[in-house]
Amino acid sequence: MDGEGEPSAVDMSSPRQTNTPFVHKVEVPPKQNLFNEFMYTFKETFFHDDPLRDFKDQSLSKKLMLGLQSVFPVFEWGRKYNLKMFRGDLIAGLTIASLCIPQDIGYAKLAGLDPKYGLYSSFVPPLVYAFMGSSRDIAIGPVAVVSLLLGTLLRAEIDPTTNPNEYLRLAFTATFFAGVTQVTLGFFRLGFLIDFLSHAAVVGFMGGAAITIALQQLKGFLGIKKFTQKTSIFAVLQSVFSSAHHGWNWQTILISISFLIFLLVCKFIGKKNKKLFWIPAVAPLLSVIISTFFVYITRADKKGVKIVNHLDKGINPSSLRLIYFSGDYLLKGIRIGVVSGMIALTEAVAIGRSFAAKKDYQIDGNKEMVALGAMNVIGSMTSCYVATGSFSRSAVNFVAGCQTAVSNIIMSMVVLLTLLFLTPLFKYTPNAILAAIIINAVIPLIDVNAAILIFKIDKLDFVACMGAFFGVIFASVEIGLLIAVGISFAKILLQVTRPRTAILGKIPRTSVYRNIHQYPEATRVPGAMIIRVDSAIYFSNSNYVRERIQRWLIDEEEKVKAVSLPNIQFLIIEMSRNQLYFLSYTECIFLYI
């Protein structure tokens, strides 16, 4: 105790410290104003990056410009744009355009829509993103996983063959609310919610979705006329083998296998030599041109080879009047839109962060969400369905040397020219080549190396990964998604309620203490037990921590008695990483040795 009767920072009961010249009093922290404490917590939770710091002490005109730049980053990087940057963006834009055109046609079919809506979705959304997005490398457009998810959820509500108009309206409605969801998350800075879907769960979900997408393409790959609408592996394989004797078309199979091998060889060449990145990028479009010409001159469509048929010319028509803002389908559209919008966000943000790290720049996740949401809201009004960042196109965009989002504008202009002048040329494009292109595109989504790494690092994460994977391929896409989310939340709860604890020992010839189970050479301190708690202590886990420590103490007492070692006199709990949150008297840990 010091001269004023307050507890001191140094334990004065220790004989070693009786001659200490300086004693520092531990002051009781001043009582905080409830409102100030709430505002501080609110700021640190939602505005930890202080987004308004650049506006301080600025003139009104400067604040207006900064506000404009925060919504439209193009006004910031556009002032530094030059001819050298344009050269890189031009090459990248033309390259990803050659990749996106055949993919868009196939992905639209995956979503149960007419192929032209895939092209529409690579025209308007990339233009909007180019002005509002902060990533230099993301290539915008329809993607396989979201197309499959959207198509599965839509077919569960409406049959596209019997009610094509209502199906299309529900697709636009879902796209609108997907955009509203994304804008809302970004505007209210709730982007951390998508982080609740763990990386392991995403790896499993993507892998399962890739296999499901590839299986769905067997209809076009084999030329099957009647095919199941279900996505589970059992239903698809049953549909495939039941039609083996009379439903397969050998000309279609020949086209499919030939061009799939061609695409895989081109991809292999691109991986072996990075300078030849353009070969796998232009291979899909080249495949479409060659196969279309082959079908036209041989009239293979008369021999059972299914073709795309008519594609409407012209740019995106308005679809605002087709969106359901009332009626029975409104709630269904909201539900489908929220789910597909969250998955689209997860994929786009992950892609943006990955390529930003490679080029050593930062992207604002909340601004990205607003940009992605705005482009989907506008897209829903211009005959587009849900678009997001495409991994395959973004990878090609990155390798091709893109400098800014202008590459998306170049791609969009090429798609515009295609819509205005080239769509009749796709009439004889065989569905088989679209199936081969999609199978080739989704193969990289099966990340075996990531799954192996997850298994080595965290077995519980591996369970989440496999749960999502098997849920998608054996049940359905939505079941797999629910399993992924459920296991991710279960892991969070498990880590909060059952924090990791470890007994520490001293590494020989050092002053370092480590987990004795991970470092067998670590030795315990005689007469003392040192325990580390690796998580914050809450009311939900305080009993577990107390019981865990007590059990260790009992076990240790039994061991030292058996070998006649000194009894444990000191218990040291290392909690430097933790804080103690509002524990009641009965929840506090009181251990007397």
Image (cartoon, rainbow, N blue to C red):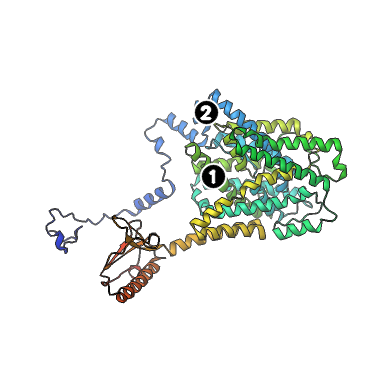
- Asked whether residue 416 is in view, the answer is yes
Quarter holding residue 555: bottom left
Of the residues under marks 1 and 2, which one precedes in the sequence? Answer: 2
Classify residue 306 as left or right of residue 2: right
Circle 1/circle 2 CB separation < 8 Å: no
Q: In the rendered image of this protein, does residue 479 appear above or below residue 85?
A: below
The residue lying toward the viewer, choosing from 421 and 237, is: 237
The residue lying toward the viewer, choosing from 416 and 562, is: 562
Q: Amino acid at mark 2?
A: Gly
Query: What is the residue that sits farthest to the top in this orientation?
Result: 83
* Residue bearing the label numbered 1: 349
The image position of residue 66, as x and y in percent, is 46, 33
Mark number, residue 592 = none
SS of the residue under disc 1: helix
- Asked whether residue 329 is in view, the answer is no
Q: Quadrant of the C terminus?
A: bottom left
The image position of residue 108, as x and y in percent, is 71, 44
The image position of residue 99, as x and y in percent, is 67, 37
SS of the residue under disc 2: helix
Label 1 Cα neighbours within 10 Å, binned few <14 / some 14-19 / many ≥20: many
The residue lying toward the viewer, choosing from 404 and 243, is: 243
**Image point (16%, 64%), residue name:** 13
**Image point (73%, 57%), residue name:** 236
Q: In the rendered image of this protein, does residue 528 appear above or below residue 120?
A: below
Q: Nearer the viewer, mark 1 or mark 2?
A: 1
Q: Amino acid at mark 1?
A: Val
Q: Quadrant of the N terminus?
A: bottom left
The residue lying toward the viewer, choosing from 454 and 379, is: 454
**Image point (52%, 42%), residue name:** 354
* Residue bearing the label numbered 2: 78
The image position of residue 366, as x and y in percent, is 50, 44
